Image (spheres, grey):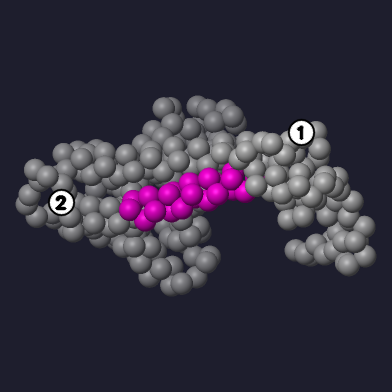
Amino acid sequence: LAYVAESQIGRRYFTLNSKQSTNLASINSMQLKDFCFPLPPLPEQRCIADILGTWDRAIRALAQQIEQKGAVRSFLREALLHGLRRLKGFRGPWPMVTLGEVTRQLTQRNVGRFTRDRVMGVTKANGLVPMKEHVIADEIGRYLILPPGAFAYNPMRLNIGSIVMSDLDEDVIVSPDYVVFACNRKRLHPRFLDHLRWTKAWADFMAIAGNGSVRVRIYYAGLADLEFHLPPLPEQEAIIEVLDDAEREIAALTAERRALERQRDALASELLSGRLRVTLTETVA
């Protein structure tokens, strides 16, 4: 019953029959009792539940592995980016710098260089994404150029994580309300800074700069006061390699989990609708 309720059959019924109100959808007991669905014989129900349960256990195991790898990645970030642990072959103290010493603000305007299809926006969840047409200004000459490897953020949303490093191979443009800045490549690798922004030190700085408010403007002059220890470029690159490997491993596991979820959902749809039948002699691997 639980599998049927969460399947396409159940979701469709509850969506069509629920009473909608602000941020809430409800089903009363009479509507619940009227829920109709295909019901195979009990032995076949058990077999279907066993099959889907096997898939669910595999997905949960992957989710647990992803969570564990994420914890290791977070530990490595904090330890390596702050010099609490050093990679083999590297010694010597790291100087303390401010972000303003090793980056510069970019203020170059579009001025007819790019068309509307190159306008991008910054989101916390998805990073750099094409800007929706209805929010793009009629005149885009004042939009700012964002080169590869540079950073862009909305000053009103920086303290909640809406900042991105462009990993595109070409220049794009962003809203003139954004702040755009680039690293001094002779001192600071962009990927080192991109990893640094996920650390507790970055979050603590944002909390202080934002005074705990959700809506607060943090312009480049304020962000430039961020202090951190900066290793030499060869050590930065070695740290980046370790952290990027951890990122790629988590990304691969996440993609595997999503693929399993899609396959499981497709199988569930076939089994629970009766389009695919199982025999009682089938064994579950």
Instruction: Work out which residue is located at the far bottom of the displayed protein and give it.
Output: 211
Q: Which residue is mark 1?
A: 276
Start-end of magenta stretch: 52-73
Q: Toward which corner of the image does residue 218 lie, by quadrant?
A: bottom left
Badge 1: residue crowd in 10 Å (few <14, some 14–19, many ≥20): few
The residue that appears at 89% across and 51% down in the rendered structure is 36
Report if residue 140 lies within the magenta region: no
CB atoms at circles 1 and 2 under 8 Å apart? no
Name which residue lies at 53% across and 65% down.
215
Decide which of tag 1 and tag 2 comes sooner along the chain: 2
The image position of residue 104, as x and y in percent, is 31, 46
Name the element at disc 1: loop
Disc 1/disc 2 C-alpha distance (Å): 56 Å
- Where 233 sits versus 219, above or below? above
In the picture, the disc for residue 86 is 2
Q: Which amino acid does the dot numbered 1 rest on?
A: Leu
Residue 241: x, y in percent? Answer: 26, 39
Q: State the residue in front, 109 or 118.
A: 118
Q: Position of residue 124 (x, y in %)?
A: 51, 51
